[in-house]
Image (cartoon, coloured by chain):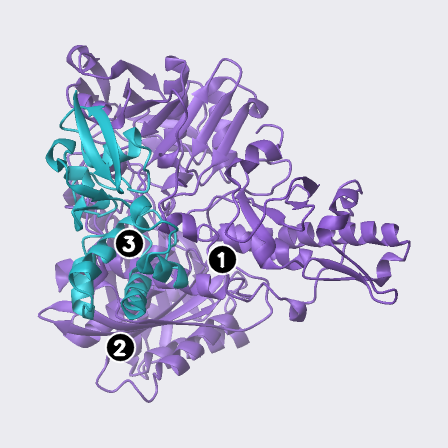
Amino acid sequence: MIGFSWLAASCSADAPKGLTIPDEWFEINGFLKIGENGVVTIMSPNPEIGQNVKTSMPMIVAEELDVDWKNVLVEQAPLNTAIFNRQLAGGSDSIKQSWPGLRMAGASARNMLMEAAAKKWNVPVAEITTELGILYHKSSGKKASYGEVASAAAQLPVPKEVELKDLKDFKIIGTSRKNVDGFKIATGQPLFGLDYKKEGMLIAMIVHPPAFGMKLKSFDATEAKTKPGIKDVFQIKTYNDDYKPQWCDTTSFTELVAIVGNSTWEVMSARAYLKVEWEPFADYKIAMAGWGGDQMVSVPAGLESTTDHNAKMTAAAAKPGKIERRDGKPEEAFKKAAKIIERTYTAPFLAHTPMEPMNFFADVTADNAVLVGPIQSPEYMEKTLAARLGLPLEKIDIQMTRMGGGFGRRLYGHFMVEAALISQKMKAPVKLIYSREDEITFGIYRPAYHALYRAALDANNNLIAFHVKMGGVPENALHANRFPAGAVDNYLAESWAIESNISVGAMRAPGSNFNAVAEQSFLDEVAEAMGKDPIQFRLDLLKRAKENPVGKENDYDAARYAGVLELVREKSGWDNNSAGKNRGVAAYFCHSSYVANVVDLTVDNSTPVIQKVFAAIDCGIVVNPDAAINMTEGSIVDGIGQAMYGQLTFSKGQPDQDNFDSYRLIRHAEAPKAIEVHFVENEINPTGLGEPPYPPVMGALANALYKATGKRQYNQPFINNL
Amino acid sequence: MAKFNLKINRKAYQVDVDPSTPMLWVLREHLKLVGTKYGCGVAQCGACTIHVNGEAVRSCITFVSEVGNKEITTIEGLSEDGDHPVQKAWLEHDVAQCGYCQPGQIMTAVALLKKNPHPTDSEIEEAMSGNICRCGTYTRIKKAIHTAIDSK
């Protein structure tokens, strides 16, 4: 972090048509500045990965500031922990966590403008009102634009306490505003990390081990160095030996070969002439600084294959797991059950594959480091960089570019460190670029998951016990306190995991992106066995959880959960318009928001055609409705794509897929023909939408496929089992 | 290295590059036209789509030496003020999420409508299926294409 500077931050400022850049800006607080002509610039603090916070966060500031949105310019803030809180893209938490702070930033600036006007007119501040960027003193008929008093307001102290607007007075929040970068996107202007350029900048690529379980042995760059445009080839080591990695660091491939040259094509071409030898590494343990304190991570030796993983998972699931929650007497209930339903679900590793491959610009000198590029976790990566470069935090300047997607991959910023080390060695500004193959084969993947579900029914087909045992390589997806925990008297949740040297991390709705498929498919099957309507079955369980919950540690609000199911039932015409349709339903709660889906599909020559998807969502106040619908539509398409086609497999430590010809993503023709999104209207503080609409659609899809084909889907990707 | 004279967005350019250099990197690094994106390098994702004599091609597998004096159009040259009917439709539907693939999507859509001004839904789906949108904006892309068709 460096000292905050509007000069540095405003280099990207250019006004849309019809808006005049003022001659002078007056900084009211760290979030906003106002020009003498009343034009306002609002900083967007958080990284933008396509979740549209660069529009919605400034909307919240503008609302409380009480300005006309068409007079607002938006700039991406650099990392600045002194002003901004939690500059992270993750956990669907940007809006939820910043809601009070963004409102305060706008309201306190408005307050300062009112103070300045009151002083100017010599009237009590309580008599000043505002509307769309104009200050009024009604009884004297005086009025002034924000621009006219901005200079005086900027001199005033920032008030500690201010009154916030009543929700009913909102003029911007709750109305659809277009993406502030929309025009630049549609006209191909530079926005992304890969588009960033600096005079004299070199291009770098890395070579990483071809397989997990391998490390660098030696390399011979003699031939590569003779190729045109090549400057140097050398080894880099991502972390110092005594460094304790944090959650956003990686344990994989920390010794690399770097190749540097004048242009991307020259470097890509010459890279093929590098002769690199690799060798297997031995087991090791590493202490990592995690969210809940330090933890020892065991990294086993070996070249792992998907077939071995599957055999190990099947064996592990047959043994008792670690008990994570037990309500009542589940073991006894299963013993006396009239009927037991037991099903196993699996899902493979997945790669994130954001469309913009990993890249970063670095300009590192002895005294400071400037880094520009796509990163979801700048605040954390600054600490990693400071430790590696031996620089204090204030000598590291991180500027965030718009990201061509992230999905969690850019939380793990080893590529920033690599870029910095290459720049340091070259004593020159450098942009590191990963190829698509680098991105897929050097992943921080979604783990491979396994789940065993059991339900016990009594002689009258009542659900008397529920058991979930979840495992994975190298992590499991269990959320022991989520539904249906709290709704069943006898409940048991167990977990297990198998060690692996394949690096994994968060991918969009971590854990939930498997749970929702497995659990919601299983509940559909249980409802069928009980002879109940699948929506009514879930509502009955939620009624129990609301009125007489089992246990105290239940992670969800049963009434809001039921609310989205009721809404999707109504909007899809579930009760009276389902005849002849292949429909599936699912609902899931994660990252503080509730989502229910109904999927309608047909099957044409064993190819599913998704005719329509309904979504009902409770995320509290919806800040930017059309953008929220867009995010939901995208999540639905993504969810269908991952469940239907997503799969990364390994042979002897090596990923079997390395580009989009082998790693299959959903394409235009495979997307739903129509998507209809509905929000529950309430006045609850907003929660996020980047993740919650992604998991449940996969369960609804599985249940609709069953209706169409008579076949249940137990193993992802579904395309393998149709 | 060799010199190549190129006609891009109605302007003449000369570049001195290896003949095997894909147009993608010539545009992005030598001519600073970065609207054409790198996504896969193997003609699988469509992020690098440009027009050569009005046809949509993947610039990541189009060598600079193959282009000759053909007319090249990139997203930057599609319109003077970003007001091509397809660009306008994209803005009207606020299609983008991350936005990275959208220049390629727009270029493919423009080429489609040039050849077939009134495509059916299945013709749109077929033409657009070479362009991946990882954010999943396909339903909006289709709506925007319909708006562009109707605006002509």
How busy is the neighbourhood of tag 3: few (under 14 within 10 Å), some, or many (20 plus)? many
Task: Give the vertical position of A205 relative to A59 (above or below).
Answer: above
How busy is the neighbourhood of tag 1: few (under 14 within 10 Å), some, or many (20 plus)? many
Q: Chain of mark 1?
A: A
Q: Which chain is purple?
A: A
The residue most toward the bottom is A576
Q: Is residue A218 shown left or right of residue A178? A: left
Tag of residue B106: 3
Q: Identity of the amino acid at label 2?
A: Arg
* Residue A567 percent across, percent down from the top left: 44, 78
Q: Identity of the amino acid at label 1?
A: Gly
Asked if residue A7 shows in the view, the reply is: yes
Marks 1 and 2: in contact by CB < 8 Å? no
Tag of residue A688: 1
Q: Is residue A54 shown left or right of residue B25? A: right
Please name which of the two marks, 1 or 3, marks the residue nearer to the observer: 3
Most foreground residue, A313 or A406: A406
Q: Which chain is cyan?
A: B
- Spatial CA span between label 2 and label 3: 34 Å
Q: Identity of the amino acid at label 3?
A: Ile
Q: Which residue is mark 2?
A: A583
Most foreground residue, A370 or A97: A370
Please name which of the two marks, 2 or 1, marks the residue nearer to the observer: 1
Residue found 63% across the figure and 44% down from its top: A22
State whether discs 2 and 1 lie on one chain. Answer: yes
Instruction: Determine which quarter of the picture holds residue A649.
Output: top left
* Residue A374 percent across, percent down from the top left: 41, 38
Most foreground residue, A164 or A342: A164
